[in-house]
Amino acid sequence: MQAAMMLLRQMGITPEDLLNTTASGVPVPTFAQYVPIVAAAVGPGSQRMYSTYWAKAVDRWADRRIDSVIPSEIEAAMREIQATALRRRNNRGGRSAAEHFISAMRCFYKRAVADGHIAEGANPARKVPKPARLTSTRSALADDRLAELTAAAGSSGNDPELDSLILRFHIETACRRGGLLGLRPMDLDVEQCLVLLREKGETFRWQPVSPTLMAFLQQHCRERGSPADEVLLRYRSGKPVGRRSYDYLFTRVGELLPWVRVQMISAHWLRHTTLTWVERVYGYAVALAYAGHAETPNDAGTTARYVKATLQEIATALSGLTGEPHPLALPGNLPVLDSAGDVLIGEYD
């Protein structure tokens, strides 16, 4: 021991220096030092989701080294965040805030392991269980409710054309909100009636749309001057549409339709509605692909690897949904229209 201490003194290293560095000799950063590094390394979606919770970690442990926090401290912080979560109308006891905090800390420490600041076995965030996720209250809307919703959006507000386009796009594609907000004119394959959706997890997929919707999208681009490589959806002023537009839309419709306000209906309910109909009529594999889940087998079990639907099958389902032929739809599978020539979501059998 004395020989080791003498060698350290000759090298100008103190025992404290050893405690404050990793095995590779890199100083262990504090939370205040490391959070900006992690935030710069992750994608925009993770930044948006986790930045608030990383800021809370900095408020709590700013000057502490990231390897000094133990699982019990992370769990205590989670409990506090859950107890003090903002009480919105859709609040469910702060469980979502608690879950997001643990996800944020796991993302944070995953980077710390990759950068060599801590060992995998010393990752404290992995030792704190997430709160069990509650069953979603969202479900498919009934036909009459869907008709009420689209009629109210298309007959109120100062831009009913834009609101109607937003709802129709979600009904046809079952996309997430980010898929439509990220859509650009250059993402339209007019000839084949396809749109390129960029959604969470930095995924890309081609999704069929009806010829009518494609015509509406092109008209919107022309009338509102949407640049080819920028956001397609625009207000009349030319300003691009953002996430707050959805809040305004459903708040306004909720003032006209009390059930929309009471149930806190959002665009994601439209995703549930369309995917439920597709699954009932065209089967699980087609619904899986329609949802954009076909490339993630864990969402559907091992069988999904062998029953992935084709783009043509998705287009066929869209054709059945809208009542319009689609250039990619399979022959002999076009929908049978009712006496009025209309097909909406329709009955399941």
Image (cartoon, rainbow, N blue to C red):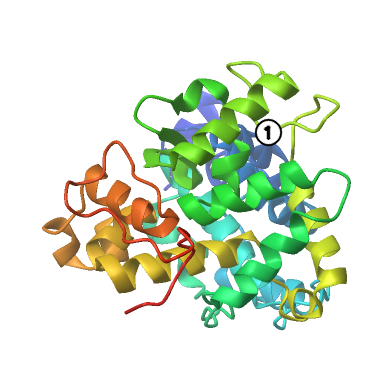
The extreme front residue here reads 339
Which quadrant of the figure contains the C terminus? Answer: bottom left
Q: Position of residue 220 (x, y in %)?
A: 66, 29
The extreme left residue here reads 306
Q: Position of residue 160 (x, y in %)?
A: 78, 47
Residue 181, relative to residue 250: is it above or below?
above
Residue at coordinates 21% horizontally, 55% vertically from top-left? 333
Whether residue 338 appears in this view of the structure is yes
Three-letter amino acid code of the residue under disc 1: Leu
In the foreground, 13 or 167: 167
Q: Position of residue 283 (x, y in %)?
A: 24, 68
Residue at coordinates 44% horizontally, 33% vertically from top-left? 196
Residue 84, relative to residue 54: is it above or below?
below
User: Which residue is denoted by mark 1 in the rendering?
Assistant: 233
Quadrant housing residue 270: bottom right
Q: Is residue 223 left or right of residue 102?
A: right
Q: Position of residue 301 (x, y in %)?
A: 22, 68
**Mark 1 surroundings: few (<14), some (14-19) or many (≥20) residues within 10 A:** many
Quadrant housing residue 282: bottom left
**SS of the residue at dot 1?**
loop
Residue at coordinates 49% horizontally, 43% vertically from top-left? 199
- In the rendered picture of this protein, how many numbered marks are placed on residues? 1
Residue at coordinates 65% horizontally, 44% vertically from top-left? 165
